Amino acid sequence: MTNYSSYPRFFVSVDCVIFGFKDGKLKVLIHKRPYEPGLGEQSLIGGFVQRDENLENAVFRILKEFTGLDNVYIRQLAAFGEVERDPGERVISVVYYVLINFENYKEELTKEHNATWVDVNELPKLCFDHNEMVEKARKELGEDIKNTPVAGKLLPRYFTLTQLQTLHESIQGQLIDKRNFRRSISDKDYIQATDMIDKVMSRRGATLYEFK
Amino acid sequence: MTNYSSYPRFFVSVDCVIFGFKDGKLKVLIHKRPYEPGLGEQSLIGGFVQRDENLENAVFRILKEFTGLDNVYIRQLAAFGEVERDPGERVISVVYYVLINFENYKEELTKEHNATWVDVNELPKLCFDHNEMVEKARKELGEDIKNTPVAGKLLPRYFTLTQLQTLHESIQGQLIDKRNFRRSISDKDYIQATDMIDKVMSRRGATLYEFK
DNA sequence: TCAAAAGTGTTAAGTTTACACCCATGA
DNA sequence: TCATGGGTGTAAACTTAACACTTTTGA
């Protein structure tokens, strides 16, 4: 018979580093913690894992609640388990980064929760170890965007190469040469030109691209 | 006041993918599970996290018990949290990979625990999701060995370039050109030649190297 | 003397970096 | 007509990949 009962049990939470890209800036969604400990401090979006709910489903449930979105791109980063990381009780947190597309998330919901988007370069002090989580997520995203099509998760369906370049620049924290960038993009078979032209960002008009 | 008490608590375990390098092969330490569920099935080395013990300390405690070693190189891989991953009870497992050096671990202890080293390419079916854990660990190790000095954790203090190359080959699963490999090593400032010569592996003798 | 492992350079291909000007358009 | 963002090519530096023979020594 199974007998794990002599071992302790722990609260397990998931914390989400929710990234969005708006006005040429990489942003993170944070809110004021609505309960003790850390009441009123800035915090990542998170919540406790429920019985019969796996870690990813906990993330999806929370995202649905805060953004109205299903089918969000998430990726596990790490588990944080320091004994005193939450000063209230022992909580082990599994951290995910989340990429959302500003086109279709529900702004009402973030407002209801008093959540706000802050520039990842101007993050305030967050509660507990949350700043460390963001730092780790940003690093990981910096790797992923070079090697995988994750940029598509942060952009509208159709976008210009300038938008895409700005996104790369804001994640990597450095400027990129325009011609080199465009060459590197033309190598990627998961990004392709459409026959549409954007006339919003420039008088001349820019080719719109999409992720396959 | 803190009030998390309406949330469920979970057993949390750590599972260790313990790598060792012996006879030119990358090996993983496994044992037969000594309790239900999965009694008698092959399993990674793991255990439950205790109250007031952080995740890494749980790993170190278990490693001490199974190998007699302190100060082992460990690295967190991921948390596994599927609801039914352990058929007995809900257990959330945080997985670490561990690199140990065959020179100075305590073989008696592994014997006492009926643990054995198996070639990573000839792994039997392991219980639960443990095969998946090993696969992930091996991939991660494959990246890390290219970019960081982790190879030093698997080798004796002094080693020949042939040994180091064999280690790289067995982790990457492919043969490497000897001259290219040696050039790539001479770029790394954390690997340096000593003035010692190994006469065991060859008649001619090979320069011994060490990690700084 | 020979088997077995150690050691050693060069060339070609591919990748990455640096760099500056013309184009199309709407206001 | 001019301000704004869109679009384009080339050369040098660097990195990676492919490739084969000589050396040393103990048995």
Image: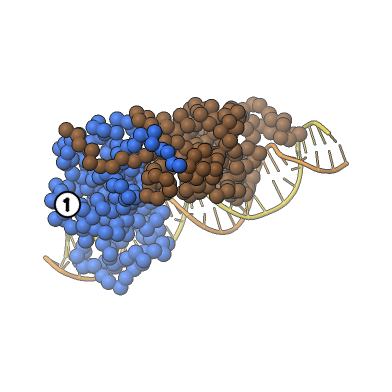
Chain colours: A brown, B blue, C yellow, D orange
Can residue B136 be seen here? Answer: no
Q: Quadrant of residue A158?
A: top right
Can residue B74 be seen here? Answer: yes
Which residue sits furthest bottom?
Answer: B195
Q: Residues within 10 Å of mark 1 (few under 14, many from 20)?
A: some
Q: Secondary structure at mark 1?
A: helix
Residue A35 as seen in the image, left or right of residue A107: left
Residue B118, position in %: x, y? Answer: 20, 46
* Count of picture labels: 1
Residue B35, position in %: x, y? Answer: 17, 38
D22 over B78 or under it: above or below: below
Residue B171 as seen in the image, left or right of residue A62: left
Q: Quadrant of residue A78?
A: top left
Under mark 1, the amino acid is Thr
Residue A137, position in %: x, y? Answer: 49, 44
Q: Residue at x 72, y 31 (%)?
A: A200
Residue B139 as seen in the image, left or right of residue A154: left
Q: Which residue in the protein does label 1 denote?
A: B110
Q: Residue at x 21, y 57 (%)?
A: B68
Residue A82, position in %: x, y? Answer: 38, 50
- Chain letter of disc 1 in the image: B
Which residue sits furthest front?
Answer: B1
